Image: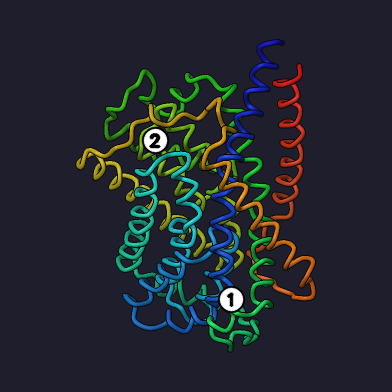
Amino acid sequence: MNDFLKQWGEAAYTTTGFFWMALWAFALGYVISSMIQIFVTEKKMQKTMGGAEEKGVLLGTFFGFISSSCSFAALASTKSLFKKGASFVSSIAFLLASTNLVIELGIIISIFLGWQFVVGEYVGGILLILISWLLIRLINPKKLIEKARKNLEDNDKDNDENSKSWKDKMQSEESWAKVSKQYGMEWKMVWKDVTVGFTIAGIVAAFVPDAWFQTLFIGTGNGNTDFSFLEILEHIVVGPVAAFITFIGSMGNIPLAALLFGKGVSFAGVMAFIFSDLVVFPILRINAKYYGWKMSLFILFLLFSALVGASLILHYSFDLFSILPDSSQVTIQDSEFFKIDYTFYLNLVFLAISGYLLYLGFFKRKDIMHMKEMAPKSKTLESTLKYAAFICYVWLAGGLIVKFFA
């Protein structure tokens, strides 16, 4: 019993430390994301993405880079862009970029995993787009694309609230109130995923023995870093399976990715785990609702194939240049999470910025309305995640009481 209580306290403390480490990064990323989404509109994106294929892919990648990292927001934006004339390949480029190349994800990865994984995330995101583009050109699913367009009913009304230039918007309190609304929406979209994902990471770090990881990921353990091709391939396939089981988005999965790497999983396997947020069942279901099941399964095949290819290319390229990261440098449990350092001061700064934004949008200018289209989430899954998050808070509170007072 004493061992369980000790592990409970450590799990809760580790999870709380993860939140503290990542708080400023989430806030910074979502402030930037919210500003861009208000000042650079979807309508302007759509106008420039329906031309030449090469230009469309390039622009889709760029617009995805400056968009939100939430998978459900990215799915809705991708559907809207495709419906309004963007090519299929440029829409896929936008989807992949908006979930893999975004600023806030890179910041979180740098905190938990280090610079090699940040490079892997951004280079890998580009590889995902290029491989998907190549596969689309080779397969050339014209009929499937045409049928997917027919499945989308164009009921959108173009509210041109975007007649102002971005310079005028930057000087408008109304626009900044919309930024604050969007900032609140970003947190609303991810709080459940982040809570559950970070809590699972703390629990796994404290309770799950190394032998479990050695069984799940072949060849790990005993400091082994010299993996065979088949072992790396197995890690790449199992990584998405682990992501599928957690049902957590990429932002919430980063501590788990750090845990996997610290336990000896290969660089390729960890990158595949991070890339997997678009190949889980909730995403498959939403794509089926938008485009039909045939197109949804084709997108699943497309993204999974790109994920496998990108992870392999990254691993062997990093190995060739002798920059594969060392798993011993990643420490998932740190007894000094809350020391007075740059994290402490950055958290204070961004808590103050967050407080001002929430005051502006939800109190001073609560008359300002701003809604962003979201993909239709499963009510059952959302309810499950919400109650799971509340259970996590009870678990964390109990664990911290046990650690510091029992």
* Residue located at (64% from left, 62% from top): 183
Q: Nearer the viewer, residue 392 or 39?
A: 39
Instruction: Give the side of residue 370 with respect to residue 92, left or right.
Output: right
**Residue at the disc numbered 2:** 235
Front of the two marks 2 and 1: 2
Instruction: Give the side of residue 326 with respect to residue 294, left or right.
Output: left
x then y, percent, for residue 390: 76, 40
Q: Which color scheme did the rendering employ for the protein? A: rainbow
Q: Going from the N terminus, do you reach mark 2 or mark 1 first?
A: 1
Position above or below: 185 against 22: below
Instruction: Give the side of residue 308 with respect to residue 107, left or right.
Output: left
Q: The disc labelled 2 sits on which kind of residue?
A: His
Q: Quadrant of residue 122?
A: bottom left
Q: Nearer the viewer, residue 119 or 304?
A: 119
* Residue located at (56% from left, 40% from top): 21
Position above or below: 195 against 404: below
**Residue at the disc numbered 1:** 152
x then y, percent, for residue 76: 59, 68
Secondary structure type for disc 1:
loop
Q: Residues within 10 Å of mark 1 (few under 14, many from 20)?
A: some
Position above or below: 172 against 212: below
Q: Residue furthest top?
A: 2
x then y, percent, for residue 268: 35, 40
Q: Quadrant of residue 364?
A: bottom right
Position above or below: 230 against 355: above
Q: Residues within 10 Å of mark 2 (few under 14, many from 20)?
A: many
Q: The disc labelled 1 sits on which kind of residue?
A: Leu
Name the quadrant of the C terminus. top right
Instruction: Calculate the distance from the C-alpha at mark 2 to the C-alpha at mark 1.
Output: 37 Å
The reply to whether discs 2 and 1 touch (Cβ–Cβ < 8 Å) is no
